[in-house]
């Protein structure tokens, strides 16, 4: 009898254990936390970039020798964009608004048969649209040696003229020599100075072109990086007053700066050209007799 009771007890215990094992176990529900309104990670502002403009091109005589030389040595879309980038990065630092940079909307490069070298102008109806006129005849006479000479000269002229599309001029009151010198300063810094450029002492600081360009380069080296940028931006919202302008930027009159610069030049420096051969048109040498000028360039390269 006791044996039967024990068996029943064991059976009951086993059934009890089976029942507990078969019971489903509950898992805790995932906890969903609603994000706080201000808990989002702030995204950084995009890095400021330079403004862009439409770049256009026109060649008015595809049969001209200069056109063939241009297309053989240059890739127009790449080189125009490179000129814009060079000018903006030299004369400006970008900001979120870029309100300190002229709002040039388009630049059209026009190759045509004309005297001189190149010039830049704004369209009559809207000065924010610029035109660079570049002489095919001049291009055709650029020496072919060394190998990179033609490309460097063409790109140097493009850089010079592109400066005129983006620089300030004190509402038209800044000296022409300063405007042209700034363009050649950018060309010099870009590495496109032609072989005939020389540092030469002169009486006037604002002779323009490479003479003033080298002067501005000396200011950049002597008074710190960004000095020429300050000169350009100083012409943004006010008319040019020579004494106030230079003393305000550097604490010295421009004549004092020029005299100091001239002290760094050799005492005896041969003149680049004789009287009448130093007529210049936007950054490159152009004589009254163009052939004579190009002959002179050939001799420099020998």
Image (cartoon, rainbow, N blue to C red):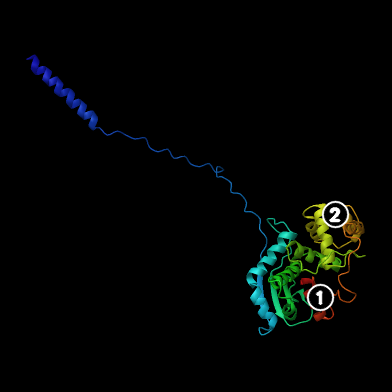
Position of 31 with respect to 8 (left or right) is right
Location of residue 21 in the rendering, given as x and y in whole percent from the top left corner: 24, 30
Circle number at residue 296: 1
Quarter the N terminus occupies:
top left
Rendering quarter of residue 147: bottom right
Q: Considering only vertical position in the picture, is 249 above or below 173?
A: above
Q: Considering only vertical position in the picture, is 38 above or below 130?
A: above
Rendering quarter of residue 31: top left
Quarter the C terminus occupies:
bottom right
- Please tell me which residue is depicted at 11% across the width and 17% down the height of the picture: 5
Q: How many marks?
A: 2
Q: Which residue is mark 2?
A: 249
Single out the residue that lies furthest toward the bottom. Answer: 63
Q: Residues within 10 Å of mark 1 (few under 14, many from 20)?
A: few
Single out the residue that lies furthest toward the top. Answer: 2
Rendering quarter of residue 159: bottom right
Location of residue 270 in the rendering, given as x and y in whole percent from the top left corner: 89, 67
Judging depth in this view, the residue of 297 and 208 nearest the camera is: 297
- Please tell me which residue is depicted at 89% across the width and 54% down the height of the picture: 247
- Please tell me which residue is depicted at 17% across the width and 27% down the height of the picture: 15
Q: Secondary structure at mark 2?
A: helix
Position of 166 with respect to 52 (left or right) is right
Report whether residue 100 is seen. Answer: no
């Amino acid at each position: 009898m006791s044996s039967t009771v024990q068996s029943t007890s064991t059976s009951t215990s086993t059934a009890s254990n089976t029942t507990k094992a078969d019971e489903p176990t509950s898992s805790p529900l995932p906890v969903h936390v609603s994000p706080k309104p201000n808990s989002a990670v702030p995204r950084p502002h995009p890095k400021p970039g330079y403004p862009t403009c439409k770049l256009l091109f026109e060649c008015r005589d595809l049969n001209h020798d200069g056109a063939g030389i241009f297309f053989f040595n240059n890739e127009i879309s790449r080189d125009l964009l490179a000129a814009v980038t060079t000018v903006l990065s030299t004369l400006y630092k970008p900001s979120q608004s870029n309100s300190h940079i002229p709002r040039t909307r388009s630049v059209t490069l026009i190759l045509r048969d004309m005297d001189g070298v190149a010039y830049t102008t704004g369209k009559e109806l809207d000065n924010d649209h610029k035109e660079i006129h570049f002489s095919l005849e001049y291009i055709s006479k650029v020496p072919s040696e060394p190998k990179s000479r033609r490309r460097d000269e063409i790109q140097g002229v493009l850089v010079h003229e592109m400066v005129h599309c983006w620089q300030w001029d004190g509402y038209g009151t800044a000296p022409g020599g300063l405007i042209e010198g700034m363009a050649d300063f950018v060309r010099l810094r870009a590495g496109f100075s032609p072989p005939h450029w020389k540092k030469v002492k002169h009486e006037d600081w604002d002779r323009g072109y490479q003479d003033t360009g080298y002067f501005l380069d000396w200011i950049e080296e002597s008074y710190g990086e960004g000095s020429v940028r300050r000169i350009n931006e100083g012409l943004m919202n006010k008319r040019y007053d020579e004494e106030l302008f230079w003393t305000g930027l550097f604490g010295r009159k421009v004549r004092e700066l020029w005299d100091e610069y001239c002290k760094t030049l050799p005492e005896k420096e041969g003149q680049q050209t004789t009287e009448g051969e130093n007529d210049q048109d936007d950054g490159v040498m152009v004589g009254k007799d163009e052939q004579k000028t190009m002959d002179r360039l050939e001799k420099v390269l020998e």
